[in-house]
Image: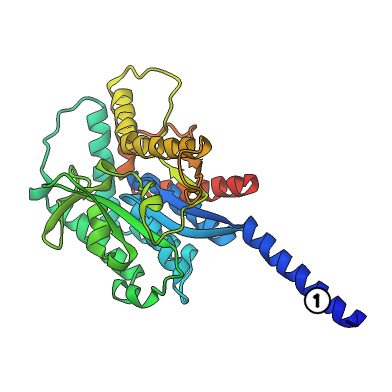
Amino acid sequence: MSDESGKDTADRIDENETAEEKKDDTVDVAVACQGGGSHTAFTAGVLKRLLEDMPPRYNLVGMSGTSGGAVCALLGWYGHVHPDHEPRTLLSGFWDDLSASSPSHRTANTLVRMDIELRRMGFLLPEISPAYSPASWWGQNELRRLLEKYVDFDEIPELLDGTQPALLVSAIDVLAGSFEIFREDGISADAVLASAAEPHIFNAVEVDGRYYWDGLFSKNPPLKDFLEAPDVPDPDEIWLIQINPRERTTVPRTLEEIGGRRNELAGNISLSAEIRFLESVNRWIENGYLPDSFTYTEIRRIRFPQRRRLDWRTKLDLDPTFLSRLVNEGEESAERFLKEV
């Protein structure tokens, strides 16, 4: 063998070793988006930065979401897999349109904020069921219009070739009490509306003859489903965008504080159960109880700013300045997060 051919062989070996090293260094990651109404404008900001600046060694294998988090996950996923769109553009456009910028929207948002303030002050105001509320009907249809403006649901099957990350959206069957995960091959505007159908605000949404409410009752957001889906690589890491804080430093005293903490805890019940399951699997792997095919999954959190002690009712506030500030804080939080991974 000549020196030149020997050099070529050595080069090929080095290239193969480098390729293998790169393969071994790849980290499969899934992004999970917790629900939280208007507060998920923060999630939109996080996804804009994560999907734009994710380091090359990370391989996105899935996205999941519930309620407002489902909307953000859908827009981020669609922009990621579609050759003619970008997550940043879709997420920015949707939240700009959703904000109360027109005169009619500003009036409606002002009335919502007045209702919130009067209830905070102790005034007893009448409760109206979403089943009989024109505002509920209008709001749900407006959300549908915006979803269909930014996502061509009929086009999604053409985008699926087995290489794109999974998309998981959660809801709960109102009558059966069973969990439902809508996947990318069956996603529709109705499925996303079902995940966002908070029962005090919106009617239950019919999908294929079954009626659904907000997924926060079932999976907020889906986590262990990444491990259970046979067609999704088990993620090495799950990046959880968490809206509801897990901990507080003081005991709530006022009715407003009690209501806020109750809302936070309710939004975290299903999340805590999913995390405990993943932690149990990790322990079983560490102790050698499971085959090598099981993957240890680390959960990394991107938390809603703790300094923002927002009243839970502001999850209905669509003030443009308020939403813009949350989006910006989401981008800043994602930037700090990416510097640490």
Asked if one can make out residue 40 in the rendered structure from this viewpoint, the answer is: yes
Specify the color scheme: rainbow
The residue most toward the front is: 1
* In the foreground, 332 or 325: 332
The residue lying at 39 percent from left, 75 percent from top is: 159
Q: Quadrant of residue 4?
A: bottom right
Q: How many marks?
A: 1
Check the image and name the residue furthest to the right: 3
Residue 193 image offset from top left, x and y in percent = 24, 57
Estimate the x, y position of residue 92 in percent, counting from the top left: 45, 61
The residue sitting at 24% across, 44% down in the picture is 111
Q: Is residue 19 left or right of residue 107?
A: right
18 left or right, relative to 48: right
Indicate the position of residue 132 as horizontal and vertical percent values. 7, 49
| Quadrant of residue 101 within the rendered picture | bottom left
Question: Which of 99/282 is in front?
Answer: 282
Q: Secondary structure at mark 1?
A: helix
Q: Is residue 262 above or below residue 83?
A: above
Horizontal relation, residue 69 to residue 209: left or right: right
The amino acid type, in three-letter code, at marker 1 is Thr
Which residue is denoted by mark 1 in the rendering?
9
Relative image position of residue 91 (x, y in whole percent): 43, 60
Q: Can you say which quadrant of the picture contains the N terminus?
A: bottom right
Residue farthest along the left direction in this orientation = 132
Mark 1 burial class by Cα count in 10 Å: few <14, some 14-19, many 20+? few
Say which of 285 and 34 sits in front.
285
As drawn, is 106 to the left or to the right of 176? right
Residue 320 seen in the current view: no
